[in-house]
Amino acid sequence: MAIAFDTPGYSKRLRAGGIDQQHAEAHAVAARDFIVSELVTKSDLTAAITTQTLALTLRLGVMMTVGFGALATLMKLL
């Protein structure tokens, strides 16, 4: 999913704040290229949470299986 970034609007606001046009445009492009590319989208976050949930569920299942196996072994020994 693409993030919309108003580069001309950002540049215009910088110019209104006293920054010359060349620097304002360069800053706007840099902001778009470096800052916006690091943003996480909702779908990225959902996928990461789903992956972590599955990994934790698998680990819990393995721990429970090993625990029940160890308990069954101990019960047979007693």
Image: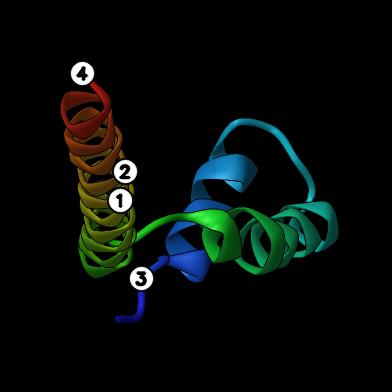
Q: Which residue is mark 2?
A: 66
Label whose residue precedes the other's in the sequence (3 or 1): 3
Is 61 situated above or below 25?
above
How far separated are the C-alphas under marks 3 and 4?
Answer: 64 Å
Q: Position of residue 52 (x, y in %)?
A: 32, 52
**Discs 4/2, front:** 4
Secondary-structure class at tag 3: loop
**Discs 3/1, front:** 1
Label whose residue precedes the other's in the sequence (4 or 2): 2
51 sits left or right of 27 in the view: left
How far separated are the C-alphas under marks 2 and 1?
Answer: 6 Å
* Res. 62 mark: 1
Amino acid type of disc 4?
Leu
The quadrant in which residue 27 appears is bottom right
* Res. 5 mark: none
Q: Nearer the viewer, residue 22 or 46?
A: 46
Q: Nearer the viewer, residue 51 or 59?
A: 59
